Image (cartoon, helix red, strand yellow):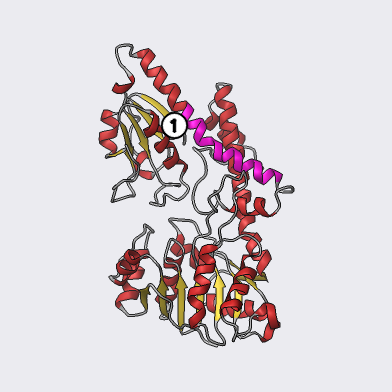
Amino acid sequence: MSFNTISVIGLGYIGLPTAAMFASRKKNVIGVDVNQHAVETINKGEIHIVEPELDMIVHAAVSEGYLKAVTQPEKADAFLIAVPTPFKKNNSEIPEPDLSYIKAASEAIAPVLEKGNLVILESTSPVGATEQMAEWLAEFRKDLTFPQQVGEQSDIRIAHCPERVLPGHVVRELVENDRVIGGMTPLCSEKAIELYKTFVLGECVTTNARTAEMAKLTENSCRDVQIAFANELSVICDKLDINVWELIALANRHPRINILQPGPGVGGHCIAVDPWFIVSKTPQEAKMIHTARLINDSKPDWVVNKVKVAIADYLQANPEKTTKDITISCYGLSFKPDIDDLRESPAMKIAERISQFNVGRVLAVEPNIESFDAVISGCEMVSLEYAYENANIHVLLVDHRSFKVTEKPNGIIVDTKGIYN
C-alpha cells in the first residue's frame, strides 16, 4: 500500500522533525500532541523547540498544507509513536521504566485504526515494549488482528524503529543515518521500510522488534560506559593534581586510543536513561552498565563539592567577606552544547543545588533559552557579560560555542569542560 496520510503521535524533539520530514516529501501529515501550546505553535508554522533548519521546514510544510497539528488522533495509513518513556517515581536503586505514555498513545489511536494500517513505535523503550504495545492495541480493538495473534496475516502491521539522531543535527541525520527496522514479522519490516524510504537515504537494516529495541539501548549504554571512564579519570586526576585535559590529549595520541572528554555528568533523553532499561531487565548481568550509570550520576555531586571548596578558598583569600557577599555564576543549563534541551541535564541539577546552599546571589547564563521564567528557583538568568563582571566564582557546566570565544573571567573558576585549560 502507499502511505498517503501519516500520523505522528508526540511532537517533541523527535516527533516534530520526523513529521516535518514526511511533510517535506508532500505527504499529508497529522501531528498529535496533548500540549495545546505546541499544537497552536505548529499550526502557525512555528516551532516550540530549538533545532537548526527545522523552523524553515515546518513553516513550509504548514503553509503548503501538508502538516497540521491536533490534540486527538485522526485516521491515517501509518502511525508513528514518539512519546516519552521516563521512569516511575519510586525509591528503588534501579529505576523502573514507565510505559504509561506508550499505553496512552495506543489507546488514543486504537479507535481510528483500520485494516492495513502500520503502527511504528519510535520511542526508545525497554526490550519487549513493542510486543506490549501490540497487546494493548489488541485489547482496545478486538475486531482487528495483530502480528502476535496471526503473524503475517494480521490486519495491523507493527514494528519498532528507534531514532538514532544527535540533537542539533536532527534534520540531516534523519535523512542520512541508517535505520534499524524491527518488525514483529518480516512483512511488518517490509512495510516499515517502505514508509521510511519516503525520506531516508541511509540503509534500512531489518531485524526483529526485540533486537531493534536492544540495539538502541546498546548504542547509548556503550557511550555511557565510555563517558564514565572519562569522568572517573577526571576525579582521579583531580586527586593526583594532574590536568586531565592534557592527560587525555596525550593518551589519545596513541593510534588505538580515543578517550572521550569528561564533564559534569550525563544528561538528555537517551544516554542518561537508556542504560537503565537494560539494567532493569537484567540487574544481575548488567554489572558494567550499572556501574557506569552510578559513576555518571554521581559526577554532579563531585562538581557541587568543588564549588563548596571554591567558596572556602574565596573566603580564605578575602577574610573581610562573608558568604552573603559571594556571587556564583553557572554557565550553561542544557544537557549538551548549543541546544535548549534541559531533560536530565546535570548542569540543571548542579545549578539547583548551588542555589539551595549558597546564601549569596546565584546567576545562570543559558544563551539557547529565550524565556527564563522559573527555570531555577532562586537563580537569576543573566547575560554572559553581566556574569563575567559580577560573579566571584564561575562554574562552567556546558561548553556552548558562545562561551568558547570569550576570555577567561576574573575570579575562581570551576571548569567541568576544560574550556579554560
Q: Is residue 390 magenta?
A: no
Instruction: Report whether 142 appears left or right of 175.
Output: right
Residue 34 location, quadrant? bottom left
Q: Is residue 406 left or right of residue 229?
A: left
Residue drawn at x 46%, y 85% as measured from the top left: 4
Residue at figure coordinates x 36%, y 28% from the top left? 358
- The answer to whether residue 199 shows anywhere in this view is no
Relative vertical location of residue 69 with respect to residue 312 in this rendering, above or below: below
Between residues 408 and 382, which one lies in front from this camera angle?
382
Q: For the magenta stretch, what is the residue range?
A: 287-305
Image quadrant for the N terminus?
bottom right
**Residue for point 66% across, 74% down:** 184
> x and y percent of residue 304 in the render?
46, 30
Q: What element carries label 1?
A: strand
Above or below 20: residue 78: below
In the displayed structure, 398 sits above or below 129; it is above
Residue on which the image places disc 1: 415
Q: Where is residue 126 in the image (x, y as percent from the top left)?
A: 62, 59
Q: On the image, which quarter does residue 60 sit in?
A: bottom left
